[in-house]
Amino acid sequence: MSLTRAGRTTLPTGPLLGIAAVVAVAATAFAYTAGWLSPHRITPQRVVTALQPPAGPALGHRRNHIKGICFTGTFTANGAGSALSKAMVFTQGSYPVVGRLNLAGGDPRMPDAMAQVRGFSFRITTPDGQEWRSAMIDAPAFAAATPDAFFHFISAAADKDPNAIKRYLGAHPETLRFVGWAKSHPRTESWTEDRFNSLNSFVFADAAGTKRVVRWSLLPANKPVILPPDELSKRAPDFLQQDIVQRVDAAPQHWELVVAVADAGDPTADPTKPWPANRRTVDVGTLTAQQIEAEADGPCRDINFDPAVLPSGMSTSDDGFPAARSAAYRVSFDRRMAEQKDYPHTAAGARQ
């Protein structure tokens, strides 16, 4: 589902409110497991509800990153990842992928040009029956340092009191980095030109039991073509989906999967803090989109891209977000499954 995440910097109240609202809607549905924050009980149910737009959720749909398209393809491991993790997915070979290219937000009819955050989710399966699931976004850092801060951020952004978001930002200046990125980062003409980042930290264990904290990114094979704001505004409402269909019909599209390894002292529990660019990186293989399908009846439609679903050789770190996201994703999944009858259908009964 997107995301969002800032001493004391003064910004105009109007722009802040506008950006904060967009970011809140765009935020990936991170939450807390029930009881973590007792006695306040900030539960996954409360967080998922807080993410829905003022008019209410689009029934039958994901609660965030609602607009998307499915793809199938392969992950071709080059073998280099086995130096970091014993997971079979890094053993040299090709493994099937089901993925989803998506846009943050809760409106399935939102024009693509309005999306502040773009997302990329994948599920890689291996012959040993294990899976690696990941939900990534194009931001270089998240908007909140902890699940607690994230909940208070989206609550402040939705508050009718204009001072609520100002108070939050005053107490959480780390969010301003994400707000600045959301306002001004360049937009490309295609998902195939975007870099996507895990943002959260995970632990890899190799065959000898050595553990390393890592983050990963997908780097596009295509050179980015930046759309100026005036050109972006002229694009069709579904231009990203139209583009990916045309590109994959013409030829498979590729991203390199690169793993960054933390040095001692790097912040591993705070996704608002990027690691230095000179950290060791390992290119572990190529993820390829080979076929695009509409989400309605596509293979990604009912997949929960839970980032806590990891194969042996990978585990969560001291970063609290993967567990929190997992809890929220389950709530979102259960709600949309209970609303299947409300999902749009064609006259022939096929989902759209």
Image (cartoon, rainbow, N blue to C red):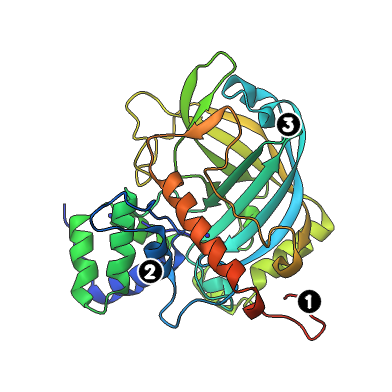
Which picture quadrant has residue 249? bottom right
Q: Which of the image's four quarters has the C terminus?
A: bottom right
Residue at the spot of label 2: 50
The disc placed on residue 128 is 3
> Considering only order in the chain, which callout, 3 or 2, is on the residue closer to the N terminus?
2
> Considering only order in the chain, which callout, 1 or 3, is on the residue closer to the N terminus?
3
Residue at the spot of label 1: 350
* Real-space Cα separation, disc 2 to disc 1, in angstroms: 31 Å
Residue plotted at (54% across, 50% down): 136
Asked if disc 3 and disc 1 are in contact, CB closer than 8 Å, the reply is: no
In the picture, measured across the screen, residue 224 lies left or right of residue 180, that is: right
Q: Amino acid at mark 3?
A: Asp
* Real-space Cα separation, disc 2 to disc 3, in angstroms: 39 Å
> Considering only order in the chain, which callout, 1 or 2, is on the residue closer to the N terminus?
2
**Front position in the image: 89 or 50:** 50
**Front position in the image: 3 or 288:** 3
Outermost residue toward the bottom in this view: 347
- Residue 245's place in the image compared with 74, above or below, is below
Graded by Cα atoms within 10 Å as few (under 14), some (14 to 19) or many (20 or more), the crowding at tag 3 reads few
- Residue 123's place in the image compared with 280, above or below, is below
Where residue 252 appears, x then y in whole percent? Answer: 79, 50
Outermost residue toward the top in this view: 208
Q: Amino acid at mark 1?
A: Ala
**Front position in the image: 339 or 228:** 339
Graded by Cα atoms within 10 Å as few (under 14), some (14 to 19) or many (20 or more), the crowding at tag 1 reads few
In the picture, measured across the screen, residue 58 lies left or right of residue 278, that is: right
Q: Could you tell me which secondary element the residue under label 1 belongs to?
A: loop
Residue plotted at (39% across, 25% down): 263
Q: Could you tell me which secondary element the residue under label 2 belongs to?
A: helix
Q: Is residue 91 visible?
A: yes
Where residue 199 appears, x then y in whole percent? Answer: 45, 45
Where residue 116 appears, x then y in whole percent? Answer: 47, 65
